Image (cartoon, grey):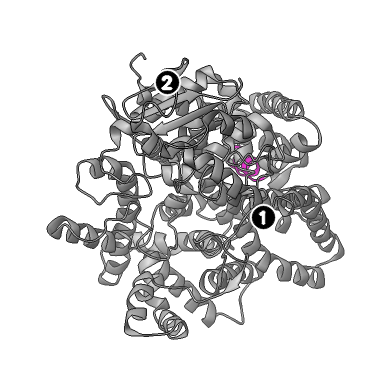
Amino acid sequence: MPPAHFMRDDLAGVALATVLFSLLFIPPGFTIAWAFDLLNFRASSPAWRIVIALAVSVAMVPGIEFLLWTYLTIAAVWIFHGAAALICAFLMVRGGKPVLPKWTVIAAVLWLAAVWASGIDLQFGNRLFPSVLAYDYNLRSAVIDGIARLGVPARNPLYFPGHFEPLRYHYFWFIPCSLVERAGGSMVAARHALIGSTVWCGWALMAVAVLGLRYLHPAGDRNLERRAKWAILMLGIAGLDVIPNLIFAAIFSTTGAGLVFASSEWWNNQVTGMPTAALWVAHHVASLIACFVGFILLYRSRGKVPAAICAGLCFASAAGLSIYVTLTFAIFLIPCGAVMLWKKLWPERLVWPIAGATALAGALPYLLVLRGAGGSADGPLVTFTVRSMSFLDIILPGYGLTWNQVAWANLAALPLNYFLETGLGFVLAGIWLRRAWRRRKNLGEIEIIALGLFLSALFVATFLRSSVIINNDLAWRGAMIGQLILVIWSAGPLTAWWRMRRRRRAGLVTGLVVLGLASSVYELIIVRTYLPLMEARRVPVAEWFSKTAETGRRTFDARSVYEQLRKELPQDALVQGNPTHWNDLYFGLYGQRQTAAFDRLCGSVLGGDPASCSGMQAGLAPLFLNDGDIDHACREWNIGTLIAKDDDPVFQNHSAWPWTKAPTVVTEHVRAVRCGTD
């Protein structure tokens, strides 16, 4: 096998993916905004047109692609993008060259560099280290590749009990990623497309924050550029996570005991900082963008029906991007819409039911597919709770406290919990809420709307949880709505702080700004360096990745095997690793093919009837334990290639599998063998 240069390949693939996304996330929004003159688009400067086009594209394109691909074909999707690109190019030539402020270019380049550096594999000779983002990126890469191969409605790439099963996931963000994977050919893998999409998601988040300053704040255009600088800075400020993380790291470094968390957010029940959220869960952030763009279009529609229809498409897209963010936004939007229907004049009343009907019509096909997808879940979608503080949940039960007593303790600790998780945001929220209370009889409509959004998000983040999976994604992702509102309304106070930063009272804000930026930087560093540090035995072994510290060579071999299989196997081939592992990151990151059974639940948590899983496990698991009939199992489950790693018992027994039977792919730590009838 020729020497591999995986880091070089990643840089080339991610760079190409990032460029290709410019064709998906600028022209459609530009064309739609011009056609319907959204937000006074035609009279806007070329730079403002780019801002509006980016935000509108990210908000609407995933939903439009889903509908076109579902009810027509992928050819209709390509025609849509091709036509939008031609119209956009013509309009941009006529409209003049956009001139963006220097600070926006610097912010965009910094974000691009952070994402690229965090996402690609780090290679040292024949040792390869993914970033900690692999913890989530593996499943999403598999979903992207599944959509690229099989289309939409999406199928579960992790479960194949003899037939394809529907995917139970919010996967709209991965539709444009799959298009980029297809357009990029052999250079762009699913993981590269995901990393490239994260770059654009961060840029779109900056754009929607600036739009919020203009359309969801009474200051409007006044000092807009100055306030926009501080809003972008506020997006980069996390909480005080750096403090507990450095304490844990210091304890481990000096004693060799304890934990070092592979992400700065893992120490507690998180309120995710915006940079971390965009880096880890771009699809949830894209839903946040879609909700805000939809609301801005609706609120500023001035009774225009096309704007209402576009707003409805944004909300429909948001539902397929993240159920959790959309549900949180709906908790505010439904009563807000009722008030608007009661108070507004008829033209403005009309647009609200039109937007609602459009959103329902656009989201219903996806929701019906989701409802019929089946799959296994840990619990109900929504339950009541009290936001917990992790160390209280760990310590207090040891003293005999019941769940209810621990809940009361968590309720009492909420101010401390939120202060540690949000830092500067906690202080600015307190200042804003106190001023709003003093002016409660004179609040304008836009201030009431902002407070309603913030308090709705705070309620969800504090008192609701989703039990579909172990993580409380409803609270974690719903909180982002309040965080973005706080970014919009904190730009003014931050501007004032900068003018008086040398005064004594400004010292607290200065310290929180520094610590918040340090938390974001720490996150970027730790997700990039944790696995190399683990192999150097400077941090504990991350058992979700490996049972041993020596992972660099095994990862290199695993990627080498999967890259070779990617070249040799047809796209409809099934590959199968050991299904008894909790999470086969190597398959998700590098496999780019269907698998029969991904884990102990056969991947059925992402859709499909789990009833077949026990039979599949009974037939497949023994193959990796020096037992079982390899040919029968491969024929039974349509498997074309089996893959064993050095932690599988069968790996050491060369007589169990036909290792020498051609064609095989053999490395020191990972091997693949063909099986079945083809």
What's the magenta region? 49-59
**Image quadrant where residue 636 sits:** top right
Where in the figure is residue 557, as x and y percent of width and height? 35, 27
Q: How many marks?
A: 2
Using residue 140 as the reference point, say whether residue 448 is left or right of it. right
Under mark 1, the amino acid is: Ile
Q: Is residue 50 magenta?
A: yes
Q: Secondary structure at mark 1?
A: helix
Q: Secondary structure at mark 2?
A: strand
Q: What is the crowding at mark 1: few (fewer than 14 residues within 10 Å), some, or many (at least 20)?
A: many
Under mark 2, the amino acid is: Val
Q: Name the dominant secondary structure of the magenta segment.
A: helix
Where in the figure is residue 549, as x and y percent of width and height? 26, 43
- Disc 1: which residue: 296
Q: Is residue 97 visible?
A: no
Residue at the (52%, 82%) spot, across then down:
438
**Image quadrant where residue 661 sits:** top left
Alpha carbon separation for disc pair 1 and 2: 54 Å
Q: Is residue 549 visible?
A: yes
* 647 vs 467, nearest the viewer: 647
Task: Work out which residue is located at the far left of the displayed protein and give it.
Answer: 254
Where in the figure is residue 424, as x and y percent of width and height? 38, 65
- Disc 2: which residue: 665
Q: Nearer the viewer, mark 1 or mark 2?
A: 2
Q: Tell whether label 2 touches label 1 (CB within 8 Å).
A: no
Residue at the (44%, 84%) spot, across then down:
408
* 369 vs 58, nearest the viewer: 369
Where in the figure is residue 480, as x and y percent of width and height? 52, 59
Q: Is residue 62 magenta?
A: no
